[in-house]
Structures are given as structure tokens and as C-alpha cells.
Image (tube, rainbow, N blue to C red):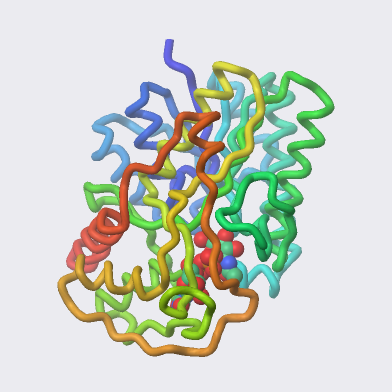
């Protein structure tokens, strides 16, 4: 019988792409999502892509009774916990909301798993836990810190998982530190879909390419990098999705905890990204150099060796695939 995975936040950007990879790998999947940052038609689209019905509960991870119902109705072998708030700027305005959703949300899920006897969990963490790293590429044992309430919640969740794991060897946790997700599924049926003006680079460039935004403000042109603009480790969302499948498999096979970076190990600058996207969209994309954004660092990219050694994970898709698949998604979506 197939093993069953609960995806909290499974209708979101990374969750929905992971759903596809899990189904492809032979897992049964149950989605729980409150649709606060996902469109309801994502579920229909997942049904088209996978050519099979999707089991989805609409509700909140803080709802312990709903979690009990899901665990009673399904024999869940592992959970992947995507459901969280993720806007750095917003987290400074409403820190309590971030702490409640992100930290209390994790506790709610862990307690329900404990009641149900499920002990394998993959947790969505972020390179944000490295704060301002002083070592590049960043290894997993680099010092952790935070520069925003959002970063605080991710670090608090990681530390909570470490305490819980230390209390009882039954727990198996996979902590995945994402670098900068980009791209979309090849079908162009799902992808990143921010309703507001995006804070992150890739969705912003995408909206410049579709004409929804006039130009990209490049935050800083005088960093100590090859072209003066910020360097990051962009990873294709389908690679990221595959990383989750490998993490869940490792947890179920070994029962051992792991913490790994999910990145490519390659850094690209803001201008590299803009030029690659312009190639994919086959049009020039207007930009101007603007002041640095508070809290940004010059360069951050992953040391990917631990993910390779522990999970057998290596990113396979490059910059052109990220930009082409993103353009495919946003240009078709705009025309439908
Ligand atoms: C940001 C968050 C990080 C979070 C991650 C999620 C901050 C300080 N950090 O990372 O905590 O985990 O998103 O994906 O917000 N840029 C521009 N113009 C723009 C937008 C971005 O030049 O309009 C530049 C930035 O200065 C940076 C690069 O693009 O050099 C990437 O920015 P972004 O996509 O926001 O990601 P991070 O800052 O790396």
C-alpha cells in the first residue's frame, strides 16, 4: 500500500509543486490549506496535471479538531509543513500574527501528530536563518540568527524541532532550508501567483515582463559583487519539490533527522536574473538602479554538499529553465 503524506499549505507555490512530485513518486497525498494565499482553482489544476482526484481539506493548521479529523480519516505516515506566512516586511508590522501562524501552527501540527502516532515531519525553513552569513558558500553549521520577525519564527521552529527530537527518538524531522525559489511547472497551470506587488525578485521581474509593472528597481548597484548587484542562489521550484520527496523518503526509511540546504550552490546577480528573463520573454525589461534595501546582504549562496550526501539531492535545472518556465506560466495566465 502507498504511504500517505499530509501537506499543510499544499495549495501554495512550493506545496502545489511538491504535490505533483509526491504523486509521481507513488505517494498518496492529503492537502490541508486555508487558501489565505492560494487560489481555489489550484486544486482543479493539480487534478488535471496528475489526472487523478485531489483530497483537500479547507482549514487552518491551528484547528486541532480538524487535524484530529484528518488523522482519523487517513493513516498519515508523514507530514510536510508548508503552511506559514512569509513576507519579511509584513512580519515587522504584524509580528504576533507571524508567531501565531508560524510557531503556534507548527506546535498545533506536532501535537496532533503526537496524538495520532505520526512522527515524521518535513519542515519548510529558509536561508533566512543564516542572517548575514560571513562564510560563502553557506554550510548548514554556519551560525544562525535573524533580522526580522519572519526570520525569528523560522529559527524558533527549527530550535523547537531540535528540542522535541531530543526528547524522544521516535521523532524524525527533515529541516529544509530553501534558498531562492524560482520557476514554475512545465504545464504552465501552476506557479507563483502573488496578488499584491511582489517583494521578491523573480515574481517582480515576471510582472515587469507581462507589463503589469513598469520597471524593476534594482536594490543597490554598488555591492562588492561582480556587477555590483546582490547575488543569490535561485533554485527551480521543481528541484525544490524533488528535494521534499527525497527528504520524506529518507525520514521514512531511516527514522533519522536531517537539516539541509536546498540550493544549487551557484550565485546569480540581480542583473543576471533580469537578463536571463529578458532572453526567455524575448523583450528588453526596463530597470533602474535604486538604493539598497535595508537588511539585504551582498551575496548568499548555499553549500549544497550535505543535501547531496544525506539525501542524494542535486539541483538539475538551471537559470534558463527557471526563467522560461516562469515566463511560460505568467504569460499564459495573463491571456486566460
Ligand atoms: C527574501 C527574504 C528572505 C526570504 C526569501 C524568500 C529579505 C531581506 N529576505 O530573500 O528572508 O526567506 O526572500 O524567498 O527580504 N531585489 C531587487 N529588486 C526587487 C526585489 C529584490 O533588486 O524588487 C534584489 C534584492 O536586493 C536581492 C535579490 O534581488 O539582492 C533577491 O531578493 P529577494 O527575492 O527579495 O530574496 P532575498 O532577499 O534573498
- In front: 258, or 164? 258
Q: For this view, does 81 lie left or right of residue 95?
A: left
Query: Residue 294, percent across and down?
Result: 63, 80
- The residue that appears at 30% across and 79% down in the rendered structure is 212
Q: For this view, does 298 lie left or right of residue 336?
A: right
Is residue 87 shown to the viewer in this render?
A: no
What count of labels does the image hold? 0
Residue closest to the far left: 282
- The residue that appears at 53% across and 52% down in the rendered structure is 302
Residue closest to the far right: 167
Question: Which quarter of the figure has residue 76?
Answer: top right
Query: Residue 85, percent across and down?
Result: 60, 58
- In front: 78, or 265? 265
- The residue that appears at 58% across and 47% down in the rendered structure is 177
Is residue 295 shown to the viewer in this render?
A: yes
- In front: 34, or 136? 136
Query: Which image quadrant: the C terminus?
Result: bottom left
Query: Residue 196, percent across and down?
Result: 45, 73
Question: Which quarter of the figure has residue 332?
Answer: bottom left
Q: For this view, does 143 lie left or right of residue 4?
A: right
Question: Which quarter of the figure has residue 273?
Answer: bottom left
Query: Residue 298, percent across and down?
Result: 55, 72
- In front: 80, or 323? 323
* Vertical position of residue 306 compared to residue 261: above or below: above
- The residue that appears at 56% across and 37% down in the rendered structure is 306
* Vertical position of residue 281 compared to residue 248: above or below: below
Query: Which image quadrant: the N terminus?
Result: top left
Amino acid at each position: 500500500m502507498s504511504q500517505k503524506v499530509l501537506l499543510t499549505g499544499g495549495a501554495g507555490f512550493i506545496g502545489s509543486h511538491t504535490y505533483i512530485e509526491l504523486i509521481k513518486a507513488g505517494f498518496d497525498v492529503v492537502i490541508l490549506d486555508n487558501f489565505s494565499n492560494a487560489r481555489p482553482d489550484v486544486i482543479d489544476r493539480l487534478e488535471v496535471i496528475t489526472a487523478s482526484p485531489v483530497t483537500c481539506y479547507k482549514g487552518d493548521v491551528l484547528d486541532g479538531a480538524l487535524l484530529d479529523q484528518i488523522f482519523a480519516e487517513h493513516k498519515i505516515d508523514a507530514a510536510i509543513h508548508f503552511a506559514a506566512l512569509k513576507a519579511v516586511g509584513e512580519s515587522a508590522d504584524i509580528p504576533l500574527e507571524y508567531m501565531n501562524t508560524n510557531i503556534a501552527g507548527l506546535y498545533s501540527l506536532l501535537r496532533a501528530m503526537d496524538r495520532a502516532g505520526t512522527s515524521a515531519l518535513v519542515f519548510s525553513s529558509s536561508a533566512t536563518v543564516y542572517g548575514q552569513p560571513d562564510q560563502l558558500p553557506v554550510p548548514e553549521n554556519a551560525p544562525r540568527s535573524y533580522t526580522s520577525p519572519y526570520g525569528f519564527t523560522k529559527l524558533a521552529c527549527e530550535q523547537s524541532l531540535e528540542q522535541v527530537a531530543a526528547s524522544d527518538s521516535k521523532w524524525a524531522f527533515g529541516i529544509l532550508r530553501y534558498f531562492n525559489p524560482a520557476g514554475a511547472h512545465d504545464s504552465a497551470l501552476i506557479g507563483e501567483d502573488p496578488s499584491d506587488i511582489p517583494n521578491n525578485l523573480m515574481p517582480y521581474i515576471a510582472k515587469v515582463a507581462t507589463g503589469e509593472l513598469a520597471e524593476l528597481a534594482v536594490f543597490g548597484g554598488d555591492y562588492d559583487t561582480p556587477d555590483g548587484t546582490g547575488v543569490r542562489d535561485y533554485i527551480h521550484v521543481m528541484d525544490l519539490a524533488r528535494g521534499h520527496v527525497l527528504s520524506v523518503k529518507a525520514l521514512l526509511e531511516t527514522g533519522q533527522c536531517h537539516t539541509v540546504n536546498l540550493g544549487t550552490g551557484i550565485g546569480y546577480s540581480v542583473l543576471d536574473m533580469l537578463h536571463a528573463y529578458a532572453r526567455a520573454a524575448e523583450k528588453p525589461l526596463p530597470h533602474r538602479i535604486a538604493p539598497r534595501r535595508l537588511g539585504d546582504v551582498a551575496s548568499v549562496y548555499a553549500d549544497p554538499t550535505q543535501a547531496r550526501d544525506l539525501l542524494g539531492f542535486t539541483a538539475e535545472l538551471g537559470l534558463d529553465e527557471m526563467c522560461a518556465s516562469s515566463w511560460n506560466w505568467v504569460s499564459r495566465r495573463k491571456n486566460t
